Amino acid sequence: MSERSGSSEAAFWGDADDTEALGHYRSLIDSIDAGIYRLDADGRLLSVNDRIVEITGFARERLLGEHVSVLFGRDSETIEREIDRLRATPSDDSRLLDLTVETADSEQIRCELRVNVLRSDDTVQETVGIVRETGGRRRRKPEATEATFRRLFENVPGNYLIVQPGGYEIVAVSDAYLDATMTERSEILGKTLFEIFPNNPDDPADGVENLRESLERVAESGEPDTMPVTHYPIPDRGTGGGEPSEARRSPSGERTEFGGEEFEERWWNPINSPVFDPTGKIDYIVHSVEDITPIVQELQAEDEQELLHAPDTSDSQLVSGSNSQLASDIALRGQELLQQAKQSAYEQLHESEERFRALVTTTSDAVFSTNADWSEMHRLEGSDFLADTDEEGPSWVEKYVPPDDRPRVQRTIDEAIRAKRSFELEHRIVREDGTAAWIVLRATPLLNEDGEITRWLGAANDVTERVERERYLEDAKERLEAATEAGAVGTWEWHIPEDRLVTGVSFAKKFGIDPDAASEGVSFDRFASAIHDDDRERVEREIEAAIESGEEYEEEYRVWDDDDELRWVVARGHVEYDDGNPTTFPGALADITERKRFERRLEESNKRLEQFAYAASHDLQEPLRMVTSYLQLIERRYADELDEDGEEFIQFATDGADRMREMIEGLLEYSRIETRGDPFEQIDLDAVLADVRRDLQVRIEESDAEITAEPLPHVEADPGQVRQVFQNLLSNAIEYSTDPPRIDVSAVRNGSEVTVSVADEGTGIDPDDRERVFEVFQSLHAQNEHSGTGIGLALCKRIVERHGGTIWVEPEPGEGATVSFTLPAASGDET
């Protein structure tokens, strides 16, 4: 220290001697808010102040003598690089390092560190570090701490040692190794592997040399190396004591007595395996040993039997050959069984993992574990809709369960924790992308030997689709119920064996039944009593027929509602069976009162219209007959006095009167389509077409028309009206075709309909006129070009519509046209 610094120090501490000043320094260092530590040249802690102890939670005695990595973990490499830099360039200033301190409770603390190198007589010996906290604490996951790895390794069910390459110092040892060799951890840690490795009792140099060669092979090749079988007796567990390496095997091969102590014979199979760091450099070497004593004893017994059957062999040959063969057999058999055991263990582990994955796949979407209070969750297997959480932030429930569901979920978990029992719950969660999902969560507590919960193991299934489907169906049901109320639609389900008819509210009101009673079910007779007397027998008969045949049921009838008003309804339903026996008869009912009233008014209107049309046609045709008669009388009486123009005028007037009469007759026929039609029946279209061709035989021969037709199916229709449709279409095709006309008739069935087409090669129709041709009195040609009233296609449309079908034309100007129409197919006809 310089004179100036020394004088400052003396002034600072006054008259205190060196001992007192040193005490003051220590008090000052301990009172500083920053953590201060001192390292030796090898990076081991020489001293720490109170603040370091307070920050880390380690006892001072636990830290002193440990490498600085006990505080900074892998960040200690950064500290070492900074020390090397400062030692290499003393003039450089130290840098502020941003590092993480690891506490005794496995927490991590962000901090700033400044390192200073202490020099004495130009010799660098020690360094001092000053630590200040810069961030909050966060718990380090247990699996990421060295202490956790050490505990896990020590509890591995196998005989293992871990050594550092180079000096081969032992840094960890498994409990199984200690138990197998009857040694203590304190006797092994810190020693080199050579110090504790068993020598060959007959040749002590062999064991260590073999070990060294094996370790060197691992370091050079980076591959595991299996050593020769090693003989290493251990103290008898019943007596204890003694040094195993000094024991001798007794002639029996079972026990040796040494200094009054007994030892058990043990044969071991050592293997050395490398462990690499992320850069590919060997970080550690694992030294594992397997106890193969039973194998050796088995081989010894076999070898003794062979020796008993070889009388010509000398004793020395026997001993030499036996030992050589035994060692060889032990090595080979030991390796074989070891590999078999490892392979078997791997296969069992793989099979167990596959079974676990298969179980997860088939029964759950995800498997998870939580800590005892559910503040941490970790997904173990399956889908990623369950997110991990830890103790640093909000709990899993707070973070991933929507607020509306959170109280219910938390109550269920709290109750399960209190009762220490399993639970199942359906609720929503928030996915990582912010969308909501529905899950079914099942969890079971894992208890320790004191009956306290240590963790929870659970499974979850994503049931979003199912919940959404149920909600959709529920909404649809509500909408249907609202529609049934608003639209006078009711539903029923008759349980036939129990004679219990369950109905909706609308249905019950329609039949004057109490809705509450109807929801529980009433007898069929109670339902039938509301049907009008004139309709009841028919309805009951049709219901019995539907039950007997299994066909769809549909019937219109009148009922007395709860206001004693007569209403018209239409009921539709079907019977369901179980092993051929009728069980239920569900259906729906609609109020058609307004439709019936409209139909009745329409029917009355049609009657009045028909009467008007008949009267009009009669009254109009009477003057036309008079006009026609007088024109004919003039033509006969004054024929000789009329010139050519007069005859032409008379002809025009006569033709006009005839056309007027035809139009009146057509109009009358048009008005009678609905009222004068015959009931529908099954008819053969081939027969209908044949009749029409006979009626048109004269025109067909005069025009030399050719009519071709495919086999036509049966339909349900009015025979006379269908015949009229064919006659009008064929007449038009002949009239508007070029010479000679070529006409084709075809039909095809489409489900419950038959589509009939009549195609010609005539003049065709303009596409703009495809709708107008079906209007009354619409003719696309002049009277001098083609005769006709313009009502034929309108009649065809009216007839087809009466049959519930449609009619249309596919025009091709100049190349003809195809007129198609549909009729109901005959039931049972598949042609």
Image (cartoon, helix red, strand yellow):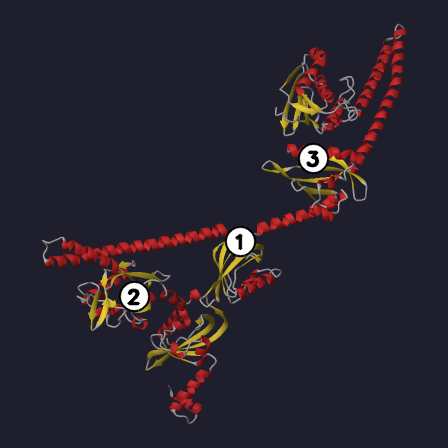
Secondary structure beneath dot 2 equals: helix
Compared to residue 360, the image places residue 741 above or below, namely above
Q: Which residue is mark 1?
A: 461
Report whether residue 331 is seen: yes
Query: To which quarter of the image does residue 586 belong?
Result: top right
Q: Residues within 10 Å of mark 2 (few under 14, many from 20)?
A: some
Which residue appears farthest toward the top when viewing the image?
640
Residue 46 drawn at (x, y percent): 37, 79
Q: Amino acid at mark 2?
A: Ala
Q: CA distance from mark 3 to mark 2?
A: 88 Å
Please name whichever residue, 419 or 528, is drawn nearer the observer in this view of the structure.
528
Quadrant showing the C terminus: top right
Which of pointers 3 and 1 lies earlier in the amino acid sequence?
A: 1
Instruction: Identify the image quadrant of residue 352.
Output: bottom left
Mark 3, secondary structure of its residue: helix
Residue contact between numbered discs 3 and 2, judged by CB atoms under 8 Å: no
In this view of the protein, which residue sits in the foreground, 234 or 823?
Answer: 234
Q: Which mark is residue 180?
A: 2
Quarter where residue 768 is shown: top right
Q: Nearer the viewer, residue 60 or 480?
A: 480
Residue type, numbered disc 1: Asn
Which one is closest to the eye, mark 2 or mark 1? 2
Q: Looking at this view, name the residue that lies furthest to the bottom.
A: 15
- Residue 536 pos. (x, y %): 75, 35
Secondary structure beneath dot 1 equals: strand
Marker count (numbered): 3
Residue position for label 3: 543
Badge 3 amino acid: Ile
- Number of other residues with Cα within 10 Å of mark 3, as a class: few under 14, some 14 to 19, many 20 or more: many
Q: Position of residue 249 (x, y in %)?
A: 19, 65
194 left or right of 678 in image: left
Question: Which residue is found at the position 68% from the left and 40% from the top?
Answer: 587
